[in-house]
Amino acid sequence: MSPTLAQWGRTSELPPLEARILLCHVLQATPTWVMAHGEVTLDETSKRRLDALAERRRRGEPIAYLVGEKEFWDMMFKVTPDVLIPRPDTETLVETALRYIPAEREARVLDLGTGTGAIAIAIARERPFAKIWATDVSATALRLAEENATRLLRQDAARIVWRLSDWFAAIPVPQQDSERFSVIVSNPPYIAATDAHLDEGDVRFEPRGALVGGASGWEMLQIIAQQAPAYLRQGGVLLMECGYDQGDVTRALLRDAGFTQCETVNDLAGVPRVTLGRFSA
Ligand code: GLN
């Protein structure tokens, strides 16, 4: 006989929260409904689908890839194994960037390596006058980001321009001040190629290109810091997510590239996470 929802959760060998996410996904129900209906018996088809998903989870696949979505900045983003899964830590990058983007007049913003589009879309939602450019080197990622924007922002999605680009490569160097960016943001890959963390947990299933920033880990942080000045207006700000132990090196990279007022901001867990600097020629 088929188990009840509660029994299935217990026998799945998954943490209760994960079992509930899979139940919500397969039954197309809210967490509240699932919690209130533990005594309901599962139908055969749902049970088979749940068992298959639980097995994949036990083998290590991230929950977000199994259910195809992940929440970020109070919005549900579609995710696939082609893109990094948005992390709560990255909300610190959005929050910090918002300090430098005016709420009531136009500003040009560039998001490099947008992945799901989470950062660009969150900024677009919070800043109705921002004109945003978002790049990715993966055409698949870019299509997914665009799809997320259309669903989450509707007609406002038109304020984001999507560009297939290896960092700045396909962005023309602005010739006049009106074309320069006020803010450039990026959550680039910043893990060192030899970091043991890459062989553990969810990251094993994420695209290496979205995680590994060369041998040192900070090669992409350096490329972006060096190229950003050509694209920033006077007083413009570059903000990059970095590793918990990369605050010092990232500030040094920014200073070497001519940035001033460099600082590192901690995430909600108190861990150094975002490094920024101001550009003045
Ligand atoms: N914060 C992610 C992790 O540690 C890495 C994301 C990135 O490289 N941009 O798994």
Image (tube, helix red, strand yellow):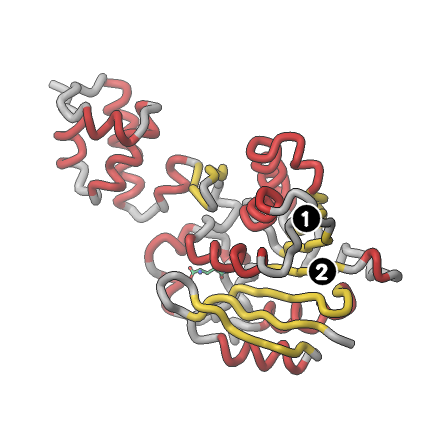
Secondary element at tag 1: loop
Q: How dense is the environment of label 1, judged by Cα within 10 Å: few (below 14), some, or many (20 and up)? A: few
Residue type at numbered disc 2: Ser
> Which residue occupies 74% across, 59% down?
181
> Which residue occupies 22% across, 17% down?
43
> Which residue occupies 62% across, 30% down?
154
243 to the left or right of 11:
right
Image x and y of residue 38, in percent? 16, 26
Secondary element at tag 2: strand
Q: How dense is the environment of label 2, judged by Cα within 10 Å: few (below 14), some, or many (20 and up)? A: many
**Which image quarter is the C terminus in?**
bottom right
Image x and y of residue 263, in percent? 54, 75
In the rendered image, which residue does mark 1 sit on? 104
In the rendered image, which residue does mark 2 sit on? 182
Q: Which of the two marks, 2 or 1, is nearer to us in this view?
A: 1
**Which image quarter is the N terminus in?**
top left
> Which residue occupies 48% across, 75% down?
246
